Image (spheres, helix red, strand yellow):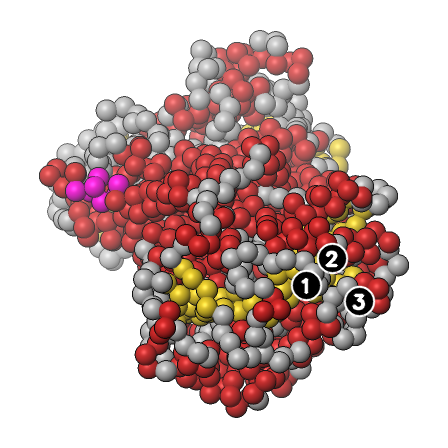
Amino acid sequence: MLLLLSAAAVAVASIPLVYLAVRTSEAGMARVLDEVVSARVGTLALRTLALAAVVTLGCLVLGVGSAFVVVRTDMPARRLLGVLAALPLAVPTYVAAFAWTSTFRGLEGFWPAALVLVLCSYPYVFLPVAASLAGADPAQEEISRSLGRGALRTFTGVTLRQIRPAVAGGGLLVALYVLSDFGAVSIIRADTFTRAIFIEFDLGFDRTGALVLSSVLVLLTTVVLAAETVTRSRGARFASLSSGRRPPNRVALGAARWPVVALLVGVAGLSLGMTVFSLARRMAVGVSRPGAWSDVLTAAGNSLWLSLAGAALTMALALPLGLLTARAPGVLTSTLNHLSYLSHALPGLVIGLSLVFFGINVAYPIYQTTWLLALGYAALFLPLAVTSVSGAAVQAPPILEETARSLGKRPVTVFRTVTLPLTLPGIGAGAALVFLTCMKELPATLLLRPTGMDTLATKLWSNTSVAAYAAAAPYAALLVLLASLPTWLLAVRSGILAKEVGP
Amino acid sequence: MRSPRRTLAVAASLVMLFGVTLTACGGEDDTSAEKTITVYSGRSEDLVKPILDKFSADTGIKIDARYGNTAATATQLLEEGDKSPADVFFSQDAGALGAVAKKGLFAVLPGEVTAKVPETYRAKSGEWVGVTARARVLVYNADKVKEGDLPKSVFDLTKPEWKGKVGVAPTNASFQAFVTAITVQHGEAKAKEFLAGLKANDPQVRDGNGAILEEVDAGTLPVGLINHYYLGELAKERGTTPDALKAKLHFFEGGDTGALVNVAGVGILKKAADNADARALVDYLLSPEVQALFATETSEYPVVTGIAGPTYVPALDALDVPAVDLNDLDQLEATIALIKDSGLVP
Amino acid sequence: MSRLEITALAKGFGPVTALDAVDLTVPNGTLLAVLGPSGCGKTTLLRCVAGFERPDSGVITIDGEVVASGTSHTPPHRRRIAIVPQEGALFPHLSVRGNVAYGLGRAERRTSRVAEVLEMVGLAGYGDRMPHQLSGGQQQRVALARALAPRPSLVLLDEPFSALDAGLRTDLRRDVRAALRAADATGVLVTHDQAEALSMADAIAVMRAGRVLQFGPPADVYRAPADPWIATFLGEATLIEATLRDGRADTALGTVEVPSAPPGTVTALLMIRPEQIHPGPGPSSHAPAKALVESLDFYGPHTLLTLRLSDGTQTQAQVQGPHPLPIGTTTPIHIKGPTHTWLPT
């Protein structure tokens, strides 16, 4: 049953793959070879992988580093800085990229794009790693220290190993995000696959070329996934039921504390401050106005509603697959899991078109309704949800459910009274992440939204496309503000805000 | 099998319940309301919405409008085929209209509609008709470039004195139409030569016309190839007049390809061939008052003869436009291959 | 209370046979210990009884009612069987009271039943604590209280003490046994700890590789194990091959009385427990065997001596209190009480 539902979820995520297969095969082998076998595709593939590698590395350094100083040191104002480190997640890359390019004219190419992507996506690493560091058993570190290993060797030899799943998971999300991102690369003009795909669409409305390139992107994704799988090792799958965990040890920073604070504030300044500054400046310089405030509020309402629908559908689809991943790991499960990741790295435009295809040919009654868009969001963001659900399912080991059943409770009752209460916080965090990602999504939203429905992201886009930057600013500001709420929720959930227990 | 499997059947039923709700909700958007037409707009909402709203107010015909960029919207139409909910496609350029027409998705417009527009600005087959015209121009910063130093022809931009000074947006449809126009006017070899020369001359590649204009106005770029109406939009955003900006427009003369005039236009989808409301919208867009509105609001040229254009540019019939038939601009594939091969785009 | 009967139970996981024709009977109000090394199938047996696994064939009845057979399967929540899992597995989001009341009906929750069972496990007044505020032993007691609260037909204990330290374990075993008796509960305890099985159970079933090798009262199984493997699994034992003649055997440990020996001369395997070996000359008229004291392990109430016999055989003797013999001395030894023998088949 669980397997069947998981397969259904993966089927949704596979709609884009089917679409690509159909359209690519229509193009004919000659055309495909013509597009694919070229120095241009080779260069693009290398550049894209290099960008993914550089950004992932940057995010790992920044994410793990800031998580460590926030959770494991006596840095002043660590809770505030912890929230600041999570907040860039609320800034869409196209907003950040726009902020950078409009502040520094002529900013373009590989390294600036890498910078903006790192600044926007390092929370993908920071949040899970901070949570993992807060929960890691300090006893292992103490043992390492007692065996004569220094602080640094203990960190690399013990701590880093404890938080490895979190680091790898976050890194994977970043890498896949870079593959699919269009905002930063198109605005900062870094030549990657996604940008080439968009350009291909722009150049004479050429679907075939763009879709063939997308298929190559899917192949690149399998490379990234394979790399992640190779480095993955099996660890304990379920949360320990034993009691009494001590709070983690804190490293005294001493004289280094203020430079560290300055560093974190600096990063927040580059990621958040730059965006806020640029939006404010745009608003001051321009005379275009966003029209009635009711328009802004309607767009905000639509953003909330669409993201809610998207998050709900995505979570519902992710639930069986996530539980399956946690409970019955195996070749079949991991294959299903990987399939769901493939669409995650495709640009939103391609996902959008594939759902247009699906809507027109299969699900016409829901074409251009909220639900087809929600399905699109599900196809895009299923992996985010699955990761959270399988993480949450670990909090409810099967033995608890079995015990509950032996006490005479029916399966439904057991689910309601044991499984749900234990997994809900984790599932909620997943929903928050999907919700905020849906809110930032643009290309698929443009193609799939119900006719006449505007969201903050689409309004932001339509205003900036006619250079009405001042009119766009309130939408951008509200988008970032609203996306901050689920981000805050995620920060709270990661445990970085926890008060110290005991001395 | 272990019991949790069945326990989680509950989760499963939640999913299915969701599915039921999903299909149940699907029907609610049925366009059963009378007098509603669906418009796909490749032109931005900011420009088009006020006009469409006015149309609804004047005629009582409700419009469901989808806004997107022209390429994505055209692609969506192609993907939807004859099942498209759209009645009317309002496009940013002739190329996209041509691509949709080529797929046979447009109905042929009645002669009395097409007759309102000069032959130059509509499809020969009558499948689409231009609504407004836009001219390709060279924008320059008056502080950086003296008027006398401006190039006589767009082909002069490949000369050494313009090295590193020219802003171009090769992914923009207007630029592509311009390159196609070179092929049509002078042959493919000339287009190839121009692109190669441009590429060798260290061009400043930007994402769109807006970005080029901003930089020219700010003085970080001396000149750039754009469409004329961007100047009007920038002035509007700055709360000033086009004359007050540092950026000035230079129209090429002597039938130079650099002075190509392209159109934004509309077509009616086949399923709405007999839809009086769709027809009413096209008539409305071509009515004298709306044509005049385009001139003041979007700084574009009206295509219906006898309506005055924007004030800050020469009149449309005063332009020395190249002898290029817009109907020939739908042969984009060759152009795109040229642009890709030139290395101006990744 | 109730009677559990298991007949010809079999269960396999793919190519692995976990249970192979298992027959067991647990009478009303008694505790059966299923003892065996890890991987012997004892946990699978427990899960089949609880209803978490479906047996491939065989029948399980509780009070004469079939709960599992090749064709029928009563789901776990209708079996009135409570389990006490390893490490307690308390619901972390519920208080002690919430945990204990979990299996009770709405009406019963308002009665004094929760307080009653908490009292029974010695945790009166702990109702408002959360599981993470309890020690390991206390968590186990709550898990037992939770299992006993709905007055189940059968209580299944799955290695419930394995995670606890030794001192705590002894106390808890006694208390659990007392609580089970007080509740007049029929129980099945799965364990790999022979001391636990011997001290708590009314009957022991020794399992290995999916089969029940021996089933009987603890003292019988200890004294007369069915085979040498069981003998050593249940405790220290010296196994010596010897020739039986006229009801006695001559061994390196001296001459041993074998009352059960058949007439004539046969070769047999003898089992001698450490507590049967005593230093010092025995009452027998025969010359005592000599042994070298190799090491001493003092446990307080008793001391374990490791001895080396003249033929090189190593054996162990358990004596009361501290022992005065220093390491390296040679001492005569003798054997008290009847020994168990296996005749060649």
Q: Is residue A263 magenta?
A: yes
Q: Position of residue C270 (x, y in %)?
A: 41, 50
Determine which residue is flagged by label 3: B115
Q: Which residue is mark 1?
A: B303
Q: Position of residue C88 (x, y in %)?
A: 47, 31
Q: Position of residue A132 (x, y in %)?
A: 36, 43
Q: Residue at x 63, y 57 (%)?
A: B308
Classed neighbour count for the residue bearing mark 1: other residues with Cα under 10 Å, few (<14), some (14–19), many (≥20):
many
Q: Which comes sooner in the sequence, label 2 or label 1?
A: 2
Can residue C49 be seen from the camera position used here? Answer: no
Element under disc 2: loop
Q: Residues within 10 Å of mark 3 (few under 14, many from 20)?
A: some
Q: Kindly report the distance in space between the C-alpha atoms of the residues bearing marks 1 and 3.
A: 11 Å
- Identity, as a three-letter code, of the amino acid under mark 1: Val
Residues at badges 2 and 1 in contact (C-beta under 8 Å)?
Answer: yes
- Badge 1 element: loop
* Rendered-image quadrant of the C terminus of chain A: top left
Q: Is residue A58 rendered to the left or right of residue A222?
A: left
What is the magenta range?
A: A259-265
Q: Report the predominant secondary structure element of the magenta stretch.
A: helix
Q: Nearer the viewer, residue C146 or A409?
A: A409
From where the camera sits, is residue B189 visible? yes
Q: Mark 3 vs mark 2: which is more N-terminal?
A: 3
Give the residue at the far left of this rendering: A255
Residue located beneath label 2 in the image: B286
Horizontal side of residue A188 vs C214, given as left or right: left
Chain letter, disc 1 residue = B
Instruction: Using the image, name the chain to which the residue with label 2 belongs.
Output: B
